Amino acid sequence: AFAMALTLFVANAADPSPLQDFCVGVSDTHTALFVNGFFCKNPKDVTANDFLYKGFDTVGDTNNRLRSKAVMVNATRFPALNTLGLSMARIDYEVGGLNPPHLHPRASEMLT
């Protein structure tokens, strides 16, 4: 009876499995599917260039209080990240530079 009572208080929490492997976000609402807050490009129209981001090539200005500069990229700036639960960031540090504590609810961050 005790074991049965414990099973009543078990809770599972998870995101549903994605319906597709990728969902390149687009603003064209006529030729796309709506998934996760963005419209998805038709997979037949996706190319390798959709997965290429060229915004991490510039050194950030670290002349500030934290002596660091982070360039953040999410699905808004890099549509290929849509539905992946991932953000990307380039962080430049001076000697003694800091990356302040922060969190990413329901997501991960990849640093470059």
Image: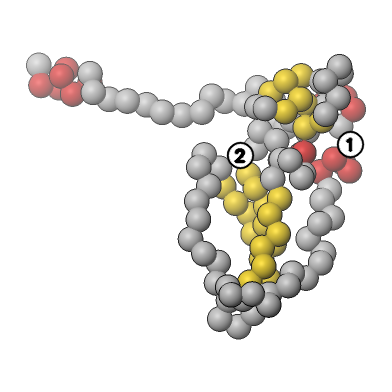
x 55%, y 42%: residue: 107
User: Eyeballing the image, is 34 above or below 70?
Assistant: above
Can you give x and y, in whole percent of width and height, for residue 102 in the image? 50, 56
Q: Quadrant of the N terminus?
A: top left
Can you give x and y, in whole percent of width and height, for residue 34 in the image? 72, 20
Residue 3: image quadrant is top left
Residue 23: image quadrant is top right
Q: What is the number of the mark on residue 47?
A: 1
Which amino acid, mark 1? Thr
For this rendering, which residue is in front, 2 or 15? 15
Q: Quadrant of the C terminus?
A: bottom right
Q: Is residue 26 left or right of residue 72?
A: right
Residue 97 visible in the picture: yes
Can you give x and y, in whole percent of width and height, for residue 22 in the image? 72, 32
Q: Residues within 10 Å of mark 2 (few under 14, many from 20)?
A: some
Residue lying farthest to the bottom in this orientation: 95
Q: Are marks 2 and 1 in contact (CB under 8 Å)?
A: no
Look at discs 2 and 1 and give the one toward the viewer. Answer: 2
Which amino acid, mark 2? Gly
Can you give x and y, in whole percent of width and height, for residue 85 in the image? 61, 39
- Considering the numbered disc 2 on the image, is that residue within a helix, a strand or a loop? loop
x 73%, y 72%: residue: 61
Q: Is residue 82 left or right of residue 5?
A: right
> Would you name the residue on which mark 2 appears?
85
User: Eyeballing the image, is 3 above or below 100?
Assistant: above
| Upstream in sequence: badge 2 or badge 1 | 1
Residue 50: image quadrant is top right
Q: How is the image coloured?
A: secondary structure
Report the label total: 2
x 77%, y 26%: residue: 40
